[in-house]
Structures are given as C-alpha cells and as structure tokens.
Image (cartoon, grey):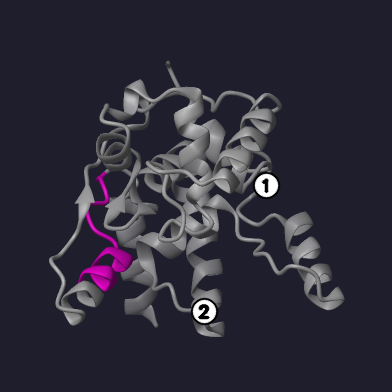
Amino acid sequence: MLLFFGSTILSIIILRWCPVYVTPLMIIRCAQQMGRGEKIRLRHRWVPLDSMSMYMPVAVMASEDQRFLSHHGFDFVEIGNAIRERQTGKRKRGGSTISQQTAKNVFLWPRQSWLRKGLEAYFTALIEVVWGKRRIMEVYLNSIEMGDGIYGTEAVAQVNFHRPASELTRANCALIAATLPAPLRYDSEHPSPYMLRRQTAIMTQMKHIDLFPGNKQ
C-alpha cells in the first residue's frame, strides 16, 4: 500500500511539469490495431496550452463540463442528472468531468468497472490538488482521443484542419469538441449533419463560458 500511494503521488508530482507523451489508451489502441493486422496509427504531439487556440478550452468546457472551473473534480449536479436519467429509462449519459476524464486517460484503462471508478476518483482528487485547473486542462487537451489514431489538439489540428493548434478558429474548436463523446464514430474532418448541429449548439454555449484563466491569447 505504501508503494502504491508513494508511486502514484510521485508520478502525479512529476507530471505536474513534464509532458505526457503516452497514455494507456494509446497503447491499447495500438495493440488493437496490431491484433487486426493493421498499420499502427498514432498521431500525437504535446504543445503547451498557450500554443493552442484560446477557443479550445472554452469549447470543451461548453461541450463536456460547463462547471469545470467551479467544481473540485466531481460535478454532483451532473452525476445526479445521470442517475435520474438511468432510473427513468431515458437516454443514458455519463457524469464524468474533464478532471475525471483526464485522470482516466493518463493513469487508467477505458473499460468500465468498480475498481477503475474507485481509482479514477482517487486520481481525480489528487490532480485537482496537485495540478490545478490550468494543468488539468493542458493535459486533457494533449491526451484526449480526437479521432482514429489521433490524440490531442495539435494532432487533430494538423491532420483534420491542416494548421497548427494555435490557428484553430472558434468553429474548428467547437467541431472538435462535438466529436469527444465518441471520437471513433464522429469525424471532425468530414462532419455529418448531426455533427454540424452539435457544433452550432456548442458555439452558442461558448458565449456563456469565461475564457480559461491564464490563457494569454
């Protein structure tokens, strides 16, 4: 137990400053591609938050976690809404925050289980304390899956929009954010009518979200 807590806390302290170049999901996806006899697809390039369009953090907050700047890792309002939807048989949705998704992406595996959810809560609490909101957002936008073999904002900007992340427009960022619930199903390079409707809705919500603190653009 001491080894577990010591190693996890040390890794979180190190990653407070060091870039995250690889995640468990990247390794799993590459293994899946190899298992299917496919060529490995892995596009990822770490860039600082200041090297991304100022609209990117606003777009993902509008799409994924509108109370990101005010909660402490867990959005109990959204968790309650998700539980009520499950109880009434309505469309199921998750209540995971950007902080929880970051903890899962960097330290854990994607398959759902009670063990993973428990560890996710543990890592979420730690990164909220040690990293803070700005670093969590920076890691999230560099590690999140954004397409088939595409991870992070710089990679999706180069592959799908043929420009650096710093030059993404407000509409580009909203379209990328629209893919995040299912990045292997939705394609920001060739958006469907449904994706374009989501993009419009996200752009509307972006008007009500403050610029991420510390973003110098």
Where 101 falls versus 50 (above or below)?
below
Q: Is residue 214 visible?
A: no
Which residue is found at the position 68% from the left and 40% from the top?
70
Q: Residue furthest right?
A: 88
Q: Nearer the viewer, residue 143 or 133?
A: 143
Name the residue type under label 2: Gln
Residue density around tag 2, few if under 14, some if 14–19, many if 20 or more, within 10 Å: few
Question: What residue is shown at x 52% (from left), y 50% (from top)?
Answer: 128
Please say if the residues under marks 2 and 1 sit with CB atoms less than 8 Å apart.
no
The residue nearer to you, when weighing 195 against 3, is 195
Q: Position of residue 55 (x, y in %)?
A: 49, 26
Q: Identify whether 152 is placed above or below 108.
A: above
In the drawing, does residue 84 fall left or right of residue 27? right
The span picked out in magenta is: 18-30
Q: Nearer the viewer, residue 77 or 28?
A: 28
Give the CA distance from mark 2 to mark 1. 23 Å
Q: Quadrant of residue 95?
A: bottom right
Left or right: 33 as drawn, with respect to 48? left
Residue carrying label 1 = 71
Residue shown at 21%/72% (left/top)? 33
Q: Which residue is mark 2?
A: 112
> Is 20 contained in the magenta span?
yes
